[in-house]
Image (cartoon, grey):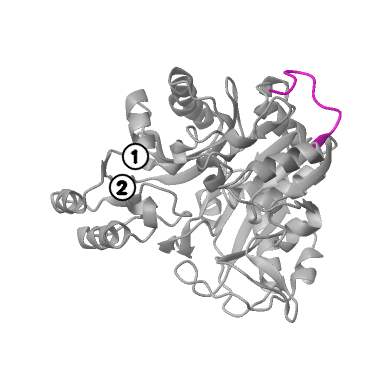
């Protein structure tokens, strides 16, 4: 492992991933005084191509030898893994060495996200507050369990499903339909082999992140995500239609309770089970009348919460992530811009079921020229004939900063109105519920 306390003279960072979250990380890393160079694995994202230097080897999780050789050849001393799939595949284990720190847990730690049945059992063993639930590998047994209940249960694919593997039904019939689609028709392939059926919790959702260095942890500013496609929190679940930070619903007292009842037991459990975890831990929470309860763990930054965190981050991100990855988090200096950030996702027509791609995007320059607005690329690419076009379901992360949440919201929405492409979808109510609670 790299030197325990003395930081390197300069950081040469390999950033893994190709979405809006990774563009935000690259943007903040590039501005870090400690960072000399940022290499990116997915330069097909135009934002990443402009922010970092593309790697000159194939990115292949089944064969990491060339990526390791690239790191050696280019003097990479910090790897930052953005998405969950490479972590679950063991990329952090493959790239971590005495000369190179990796921000991101190994394959075993990544099971907290990659296997919801594992995570549910982990929480049960440690008495971490969560929804009551059971895992099933047999479709008939799962059907019978759903039919035996008076209320509809939440249906979750146990594996990685890109944020779309959770259905919160209104009726038992809807729950049975979701089970049939997810498990019966294997909507998410191997991720559908096991399902978790759990009680529906009532309350307000919040996203709380902690940097974890194997021994210590540092809680980041709380966020609130909006997963449903449509305004009023209706429609299907998505990877995330917007977020804001800080989330006023999580005050200092509640944050201390989350640390005491959830984060500390997780750290103790990881140590007890011999799982070395170095990276970020996302706690997706439901704030119930009985206290905060865990909906899910993620082993990476949320998307789009990360975009908000990166805009509000002050100080040297590269050095903070290096300290986290080398077990010296207590020496990290972390502070925040006091302003609010609101991030709104622009999605393509047909998202999340069948997103349309290849549509020209206009107005981006106008939006980027607006005061306190930053736009991150997610599902975009450059077409030789059409220029910038849509290339995925979530196309752009449009972020506004403001002295108040309402000011940040209005800046983000004005920028969203300036950008156009056929079938553009976005929610105008990101953060609105927080203003109503004030």
Residue 120, how many percent across, how many down? 35, 36
Left or right, residue 166 beside residue 87: left
* Residue 194 disc label: 2
Residue 31, located in which quarter of the rendered image? top right
Q: How far apart are the two marked residues, 1 and 2, measured between alpha carbons?
A: 8 Å
425 or 274: nearer the viewer: 274
Residue 11, how many percent across, how many down? 80, 35
Residue 157, how many percent across, how many down? 35, 51
Residue 100, how many percent across, how many down? 71, 31
Left or right, residue 74 beside residue 348: right
Q: Secondary structure at mark 2?
A: loop
Q: Which residues are magenta?
A: 1-12
**Is residue 74 shown above or below 436?**
above
* Residue 329 disc label: none
Q: State the residue position of label 1.
A: 117
**Is residue 102 shown above or below 392?**
above
Q: Is residue 337 visible?
A: no
Left or right, residue 195 beside residue 263: left
Q: Which is the main secondary structure of the residues drawn in magenta?
A: loop
Q: Residue at the spot x=54%, y=33% of the render?
A: 106
């Amino acid at each position: 492992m790299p030197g325990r306390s003395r930081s390197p003279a300069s950081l040469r960072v390999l950033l893994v991933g190709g979405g809006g979250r990774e563009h935000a990380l690259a943007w903040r890393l590039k501005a870090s005084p400690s960072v000399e160079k940022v290499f990116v694995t997915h330069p097909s994202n135009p934002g990443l191509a402009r922010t970092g230097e593309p790697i000159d080897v194939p990115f292949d999780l089944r064969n990491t030898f060339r990526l390791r050789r690239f790191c050696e050849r280019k003097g990479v001393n910090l790897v930052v893994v953005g998405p969950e799939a490479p972590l679950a595949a063991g990329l952090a284990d493959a790239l971590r060495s005495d000369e190179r720190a990796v921000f991101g847990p190994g394959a075993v730690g990544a099971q907290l996200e990659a296997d919801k049945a594992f995570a549910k059992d982990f929480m049960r063993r440690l008495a971490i507050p969560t929804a009551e639930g059971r895992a099933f590998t047999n479709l008939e047994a799962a059907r019978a369990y759903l039919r035996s209940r008076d209320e509809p249960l939440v249906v979750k694919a146990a594996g990685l499903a890109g944020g779309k593997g959770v259905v919160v039904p209104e009726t038992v019939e809807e729950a049975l339909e979701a089970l049939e689609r997810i498990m019966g028709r294997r909507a998410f392939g191997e991720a559908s082999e096991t399902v978790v059926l759990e009680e529906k919790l009532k309350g307000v959702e919040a996203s709380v992140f902690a940097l974890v260095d194997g021994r210590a942890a540092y809680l980041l500013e709380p966020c609130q995500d909006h997963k449903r496609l449509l305004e009023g929190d209706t429609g299907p679940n998505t990877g995330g239609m917007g977020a804001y930070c800080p989330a006023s619903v999580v005050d200092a007292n509640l944050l201390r309770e989350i640390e005491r009842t959830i984060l500390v037991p997780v750290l103790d459990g990881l140590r007890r089970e011999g799982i070395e975890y170095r990276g970020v831990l996302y706690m997706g929470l439901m704030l119930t009348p009985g206290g905060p309860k865990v909906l899910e763990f993620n082993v990476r930054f949320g998307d789009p919460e990360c975009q908000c965190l990166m805009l509000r981050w002050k100080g040297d991100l590269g050095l903070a992530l290096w300290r986290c990855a080398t077990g010296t988090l207590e020496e990290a200096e972390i502070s925040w811009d006091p302003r609010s950030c609101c991030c709104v996702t622009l999605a393509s027509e047909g998202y999340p079921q069948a997103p349309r791609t290849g549509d020209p995007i206009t107005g981006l320059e106008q939006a980027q020229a607006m005061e306190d607005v930053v736009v991150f690329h997610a599902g975009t690419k450059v077409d030789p004939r059409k220029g910038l076009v849509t290339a995925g379901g979530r196309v752009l992360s449009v972020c506004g900063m403001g002295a108040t949440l309402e000011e940040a919201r209005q800046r983000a929405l004005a920028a969203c109105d300036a950008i156009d492409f056929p079938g553009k979808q976005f929610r105008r109510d990101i953060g609105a519920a927080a203003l109503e609670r004030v």
